[in-house]
Image (cartoon, rainbow, N blue to C red):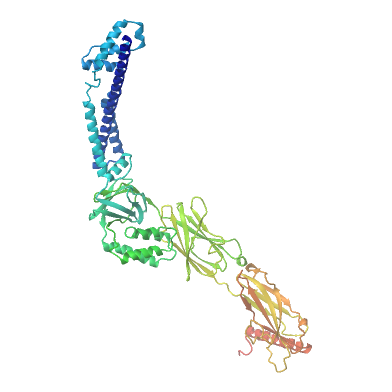
Amino acid sequence: MAVSQIESSGLTLHRLRERLSSLKTRRQLLRRAAAGSALVTAAIVSLLAVFAIDFLFELPIVQRLVVLALVAGAFVWVYLRYAKPYLGVAESVEQLALQVESRHGIASDLIASLQFETTAVDQWGSETLKQEVVRGVVDTSKKLNVFHGFDTSDVRRRMILCTVAAAVGVGCVAGFPAHARVFFNRLMLGGLHYPTQTEIARVTINGRLVLKRRSGDRSRPAAAACPQGHPLEIIVQCGGVLPDDGLAELTSATTRQRRSTVLQALSDEQRLERLQQALDELDAADDPLDPGLAATLAGLVHFDAPRAAAALLDPGKLSGKEAHDEISSVISSWPSSKSDTAVYRGYLSRLVEPAEYQLFVGDAWTDSAKISLIPLPVVELKLLMIAPEYARTGPPVSVPMVRQVSVVAGSEVQLQVHSANGEPLERVWVTIKSAEDVKRVELAQVDRQGVDWQLAGSKSPFADVREDVAYEIQVRDKNGFSLEAPLKGVIRIRPDRAPTALAETVHRVVLPAAQPLIGYRVNDDFGIAELKIHAHIQRGLTDDTSFAPAGVSLEQPETGPEPDQEVSTIDLIPRDSLIRAEQLPLRGEYSLDLSPMKLVKGDRLRISLEVIDARGKAAGESAFSDPIYLEISDESGVLAAISESDEKSEKRISDLIKRQLGIGDSQ
């Protein structure tokens, strides 16, 4: 019986200990809930407070950091004041038993029975007293509620506050998702702006897009560059609530002086004029389209024909046809094609120092961005002229700062462009214009910095110049700037004059087997490729045939023999030979052997000299000397011709002496 009671009392004490352990766990969870709800409530309230301050004042990053530091300090104070006291409590079962005894007004037998339950108590105290204490506790524990009497009102109050704060936070996020997204971006020190009634959609400076705002885009325009001393044009496209005008504020980067420029709204007619201007310039532009012109035209159509602007700025589309068609389509359906936006324009006639700009339209505004002043590209052009082999008299001729040159047909002209101010260039190209076509060719970069560029090689359009060529050179630097006006020049073909030839001989009446000396003199401006003597044989002349008097030509120079004539040709300079210009004029004599021609008395020879100049790969031009005539006779005829020649010479000498002495027929 006693054993059964002891076992029953042990079982009851074990259950009591389990209930006390459950109380310990529950109180621990409640303490954690109280601490967590305090922290969550503080976090939500802090975020709402930060949002309210940031929304009202649009804090910059430095001020946001200060506010966040203050909020972090307040959060630490909340943790120390309302959370840490709950998290730092550690209770044992015995401590809870003491609290249960106190709250239920029972004696200390409860804690004593729990201590008797340990094995150590078997070694000390009275066993009878132990059984009596345990039995009394067993009877009491059957009706004991260990959870009764503990206050949880503070935990409930904190949980209610936390729930209300969470509901407010969730409601704000659900009701204003765009504001919430911007707030969390700004909480992470991002640059988004809160939604405004007026929305700045696009901004261009001098035709270059610096801001394109979509959902989630930043409101900080890109840094812009403007040529020093040139006008500054700011174009802003806005949607939503559209005011009558806007404002652009520029702050000097050196003096910090501020100046404002009003952004005037463009009328529908002015917007249409910009589109029409772009279309007219596209019609007048050469094909392929100049990249600098394409960027300028894109600035005119960014706002009302964005797809045309994208096509103009696409380096793969150089014809401009797609942009032309898109602009034409927008113009034809104007104003129905006009988007529900307004375009504002601000203009400064001259910008002389770097500045920061910020735009304000309605309740919308942009962050400040820099405008740097950069000089336009300054380049030096050098033409290196390489004459063809036949006309080459020295090293290639380099002509700096000259745009119009004359070269021999077949010459190679190398274009060399140097950045005079040392600014790197991204692209250099030459546009070649002819009556039939317009062609653009890119120059190759010579150095790593992009300062020197060259157009040379066998694939160059100037590798073999054979006709007049007009060209234009344009560049683009790393800032997207081009020359204010392209460098224009002309490569002209220098005329290659026809060669000249002169043939002469002393005796005009010769024997059939004679070897008369034919003197010659040939000249050309560049070189001689061939020199020939043509002997045209006329046989069987009778006594009444009209012979040409000695030393007199009765016929014009001929380019070839008559059909009934025999021709004997002698090459004085064989084909593929070259007599250069420095060797000219070329003089010489040739002993013409008449024996092989089997001539007889009464025959006549017409001797002409043919010279062909050198023109490289092209065929040379030929020229003939005035013909000389040789009459074939016997010895008596030759002597008579010599005698007649001597008499004429004597008479000419006598007449010359008389003129010098002032006598004779003059009296």
Residue 614, horizontal then vertical, whole percent: 62, 71
Residue 275, horizontal then vertical, whole percent: 33, 63
Q: Is residue 92 shown to the viewer in this render? A: no
Comparing 192 with 121, the one in front is: 121
Could you tell whether 228 is left or right of 450 in the image?
Answer: left
Comparing 1 with 142, the one in front is: 1
Could you tell whether 507 is left or right of 192 in the image?
Answer: right
Residue 657, horizontal then vertical, whole percent: 66, 84
Comparing 461 with 658, the one in front is: 461
Residue 346 in which image quadrant:
bottom left
Comparing 242 with 520, the one in front is: 242
Residue farthest to the bottom, as pictured: 544
Could you tell whether 486 is left or right of 444 in the image?
Answer: left
Rendered-image quadrant of the C terminus: bottom right
Vertical arrangement, residue 487 with respect to residue 423, above or below: below
Residue 145 in which image quadrant:
top left
What residue do we see at 64% from left, 77% from top? 501
Residue 634, horizontal then vertical, whole percent: 78, 88
Rendered-image quadrant of the N terminus: top left
Vertical arrangement, residue 162 with respect to residue 618, above or below: above
